[in-house]
Image (spheres, rainbow, N blue to C red):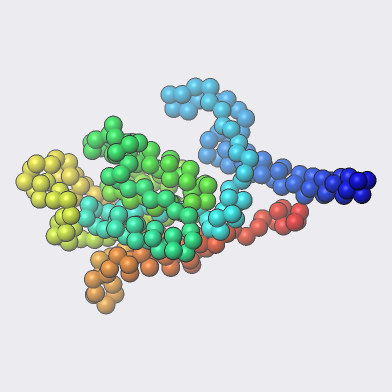
Amino acid sequence: MFALRRLSQQFGAHAARSLGPMQASACASQQQMASVTSGPAGAVYNVGQATNIKFHDGMVPRDVKEEILGQKGVVLWFTGLSGSGKSTVACTLEHALAARGKMTVLLDGDNVRHGLNKNLGFSAQDREENIRRIGEVSKLFAESGVITLASFISPYRKDRENVRIRMADGDFVECYMRIPIELCEERDPKGLYKAARAGKIKGFTGIDDPYEEPLAAELVIDAKDEAGTMQSAEAMAATIMHFLEEKGYLSAPAPSASKAATA
């Protein structure tokens, strides 16, 4: 019994020595993150129209979650005209990632209007708020280590850039589906272009409302490959998968120097 008690005490001391620096590092990391994205950690301040807001630090830092998942959190933001294949390619990619054991979430423009954004229409102001909300949701997923696929027309450049600047470097990957409007109209899966041309839908992107192309998207997906062959959704998804591999998103982050020192 004495030997067992002694062993327990030794184990407890060892755990305290090992976990202490990790906990301190985690708290420091969370405080630094909070000061960048949400204000000073522990301080009470105002956000928009809300007052007396306080940021609460999480106990499990992001790199630990990413290590558990074996991947890095990122937002793949699919943007392009209606009918450009955003949702199809995003869905195809999600299935391919799942086959490799990767944790994903797919946020689709139509789907979120059934719940989170059901009170929004398609005016410029409502489109802006639609993208702002989804940007914040995507940010939360990415910071939890999840590969987030967001499929939205998001026609206005400033709205997409506002999502980008809210995220850490490397967390926002703009994937521009650069498909000609002629092809999108030919596809017209929901009959929206036909209705817009007939004047039954007003403010339709590409017809009587503008689409502002990205100026420096990380990924640009064209309808045809370099040989002039029409690309399938699988081929487009494979291009994005290669990008994720090359940039290291499909593996856990390397241990930090402080973490390695206490291991």
Residue farthest to the bottom, as pictured: 227
Residue farthest to the right, as pictured: 2
158, 258: nearer the viewer? 258
Residue drawn at point x = 43 percent, y = 45 percent: 138
The x and y percentages for residue 131 are: 34, 41
The x and y percentages for residue 192 are: 15, 48
* In this picture, residue 213 sits left or right of residue 193: right
The quarter of the displayed image where residue 257 is located: bottom right
1, 32: nearer the viewer? 1
Residue farthest to the top, as pictured: 51
160, 76: nearer the viewer? 76
Residue farthest to the left, as pictured: 198
Residue 198 visible somewhere in the drawing: yes
Residue 125 visible somewhere in the drawing: no
The x and y percentages for residue 181 are: 18, 57
Task: Determine whether 97 is above or below 161 in the image.
Answer: below
* In this picture, residue 3 sits left or right of residue 85: right
Residue drawn at point x = 46 percent, y = 24 percent: 50
Residue drawn at point x = 48 percent, y = 28 percent: 47
The x and y percentages for residue 70 are: 56, 59
